[in-house]
Amino acid sequence: MGATGGDDHQAAGMFSVTVTEKEVVAAVLPMHEHWLPLSNLDLLLPPLDVAVFFCYERPTSSTLTISSSSPATNSYNFRSMVGVLKKAMAQVLVSYYAFAGEVVSNSVGEPELLCNNRGVDFSEAVADIELMDLNFYNPDDSIEGKLVPRKKNGVLAVQATQLKCGGLVVACTFDHRVADAYSANMFLVSWAETAQSKPISLLPSFRRSLLNPRRPSCVDASLDNMYVPVSTLSPPKEPAPDADQLVSRIYYVKADDLNQLQSLASSKGNKRTKMESFSGFLWQLVAKYCAIKDDDDDDNNNINNACKKISKMGIVVDGRTRLSSDLERGDVMEAYFGNVLSIPYGGKTVRELIENPLSWVANEVHDFLENAVTKEHFLGLIDWVEARRPEPAVAKIYCGGGEDDGPAFVVSSGQRFPVSKVDFGWGVPLFGSYHFPWGGTAGYVMPMPNPAGNGDWMVYMHLLRGQLEFIETEASNFLRPLTCNYLRCLPASSN
């Protein structure tokens, strides 16, 4: 399957979305206004908004799981579904009050969270397109600026969009400085549970003391290679008019192909994870494109220079399980709401990446991850930030490579994305995905499970257009453009 994105009826991204109503939904119970400081790990995030969306088919009697207090099946329509969403939102914000607040600057210029129950901007919209005609492969055309809301105020914005077929798209945009994907996933599941009048299975914890710096501090020098004060960064240069642009695409990968890739990446008794295998495979493809993109000039010097460049790949690591290994934190980290992330990365020459087998590259991925999946790494990172406050800092790979460096991108595992649990009462989503054109100069990739839970992956990729076109050519039998036809053929979720 090529870069056309599959079915002809998906090719056009031309459709209109009209916002019909806007409302601010606040927590149903009054709240005492208070300040919640951001943790040192929160402070490593620049002002970034993350979007996530879920697509639902028109409800039928077989998919409805609404409680007896909800509208009757035969009267369940867009208006009543929005009513369920808003009522559950007002209830769940009592526990997830951080999402009803505002991020403001304190006296030293650092962001803090004002928990004032300002509420969530909730928009209702109508789109003149059917679910089966949405171009999931190209979310820049179908999702960005249309089905996901632009957050203008507060921490969280929501948009519910009615489709011509009676389907529904529920989308959220949230401030990454307040929540990572794990935290957002907690909220989404709790929101859905509340909509079905179920108790919240995991109440959030906002105990910032769990991430307090140590006294005395202890910082490993390697962190200076991973993070950098913002003041030391060079001002971004204006891209050339003909420069390649970062674009977003969504693919699917079959479970059998993933298993085969994992076998190829494992050697000499060293079994690599699917994440390590996939990341290594992608790293090789991006490096190969870097090596050949100047080949049209028939200049061996260009090719040789490209092969000497350093290509960098980072992998987002969640520190909750690492920090849960002592009695002080215990199981509380499982419920911790906020950012508990680090982005270790590796750097290899383009030549090394393309001339060595996949198993060698997967081993390199494993090795640079090994030092960052420890409790000490995260405690040291907390101390590293503390030593530099209030100077803001950022992950070095977010800013990509230097002018003479090779390509850089980050892979973030979305395997805990609970798409099959975001059922508000009218069935499991046909599809759900994060949407994160994050604004950095490096690319961003997130593999996620599909709603059926059959082992296939959905992969959101935000890379240079040239990189994606090359990847689609080289790996056309592995990464396939996502279509509604594929989603409709999936078995029903077993969850």
Image (spheres, helix red, strand yellow):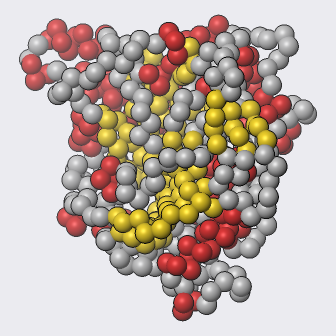
Q: In this orientation, which residue lies closer to the viewer: 79 or 8?
A: 79
Residue 165 visible in this rendered orientation of the protein:
yes
Q: In this orientation, which residue lies closer to the viewer: 18 or 434?
A: 18
Query: Which percent across, then down, holds residue 290?
Result: 27, 23
Residue at 60% x, 55% y: name it.
120
Q: In this orientation, which residue lies closer to the viewer: 290 or 440?
A: 440
Location of residue 210 with respect to 356 vertically, above or below: below
Viewed as shown, does residue 132 lie left or right of 106?
Answer: left
Residue at 56% x, 76% y: name it.
81
Location of residue 147 with respect to 339 vertically, above or below: below
Residue 349 visible in this rendered orientation of the protein:
no
Residue at 17% x, 28% y: name it.
242
Query: Which percent across, then down, holds residue 288?
Result: 28, 26
Location of residue 360 with respect to 417 vertically, above or below: above
Query: Which percent across, then down, holds residue 380?
Result: 72, 17
Residue at 18% x, 12% y: name it.
302
